[in-house]
Amino acid sequence: MRIGIVGGAGRMGQMLIREVLGSKGATLAGATERPGNPALGRDLGTLVGLEPAGVVLTDDAAALFAAADAVIDFTAPAATLAHADLAVAHGTALIVGTTGLSADDHARLAQATVKTPLVVSANFSLGVTLLAGLVRKVAATLGPDWDIEIVEMHHKHKVDAPSGTALALGRAAADGRGVDLAAVKDAVRDGHTGARKPGDIGFATLRGGDVVGDHTVMFATEAERLELSHKAGSRAIFARGAVRAALWVAGKPAGLYSMDDVLGL
Ligand code: NAD
């Protein structure tokens, strides 16, 4: 399985290169960065603190898609859409970890899945994939008198809020209740907000330090509160899940897949 990495000099990109180099059954097909990135031309092994890999970082995404069976993309929304076009053009599978995608962006990715397989997840960790399933079940079981609030914390460099994972957990809770998240989402509270609207799903965002990703979903009613939490200790868990998805997607028909599919849940 030849796996390519786009955004190879990024925080996740470097983790992904390391993970592919250490994975049985996977070969590193190459990695790209934006034109002008200072790491262009560097050996991918030494770039991530390992032995030389004999493959260098380039800005030629088309060549990477031509050379790879699957490409893993943890970059930025505009780049991910361009990569989806290349995945279609070359029949390459695409694993998308980029967050902050709009509804339109998701619709563009869905178009690509008519031609080639895509695995899209806001969180590639095993724990969060299981957490989303639990949240869906708990939300379906508890009545509307239970208020749902989602709290997340990430490192100070994160540019989108609430996190893609918090939104995915919100969608899982809304699914469980049989409602559309967009209709009940309350992500900004400041000043005189009035009382909480029944049925809303609230979000609170914390940013600071080097926190990899903490998420808690709270279910609160009179005199009782249930909290389901996940804490990520290292970005390696996302890289591990994404490489597992790349190995799993080999030979799958065109279509949109999730981490639930990869884990057989
Ligand atoms: P980062 O800024 O460190 O890395 C992104 C990299 O992409 C940068 O090096 C940038 O130069 C590169 N890039 C941008 N446009 C490009 C293009 N056209 N071609 C090639 N490279 C390009 O960010 P990060 O912390 O690694 O996170 C990247 C994304 O992954 C974010 O959206 C983040 O929220 C998401 N993320 C998802 C998960 C998950 O499990 N789904 C986990 C962690 C991070």
Image: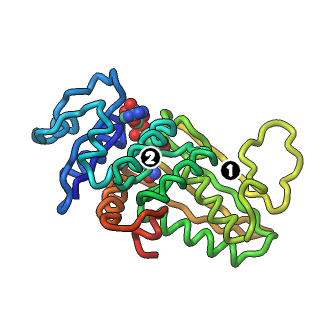
Q: Give the structural element (helix, strand or loop) at label 1.
A: strand
Quarter of the rendered structure image containing ligand 1? top left
* Residue 242, quarter of the rendered image: bottom left
The N terminus lies in which quarter of the figure?
Answer: bottom left
* Residue 30, quarter of the rendered image: top left
- Labelled disc at residue 84: 2
Q: Nearer the viewer, residue 93 or 31?
A: 93
Image location of residue 253, percent across then percent down: 40, 67
Q: What is the crowding at mark 1: few (fewer than 14 residues within 10 Å), some, or many (at least 20)?
A: many
Total count of labels = 2
Tell me the mark number nearer the camera, choosing from 2 and 1.
2
User: Going 51% across and 43% down the picture, which residue do you hit?
Assistant: 154
User: Going 80% across and 70% down the picture, which residue do you hit?
Assistant: 144
Circle nearer the N terminus (2, 1): 2
Label 2 vs label 1: CA separation? 30 Å
- Labelled disc at residue 71: none
Image location of residue 180, percent across then percent down: 73, 61
Q: Nearer the viewer, residue 152 or 15?
A: 15
Give amino acid for label 1. Answer: Phe
User: Going 39% across and 48% down the picture, which residue do you hit?
Assistant: 87
Give amino acid for label 2. Answer: Ala
Query: Where 7 falls versus 166 (above or below)?
Result: above
Q: Which residue is denoted by mark 1 in the rendering?
A: 203
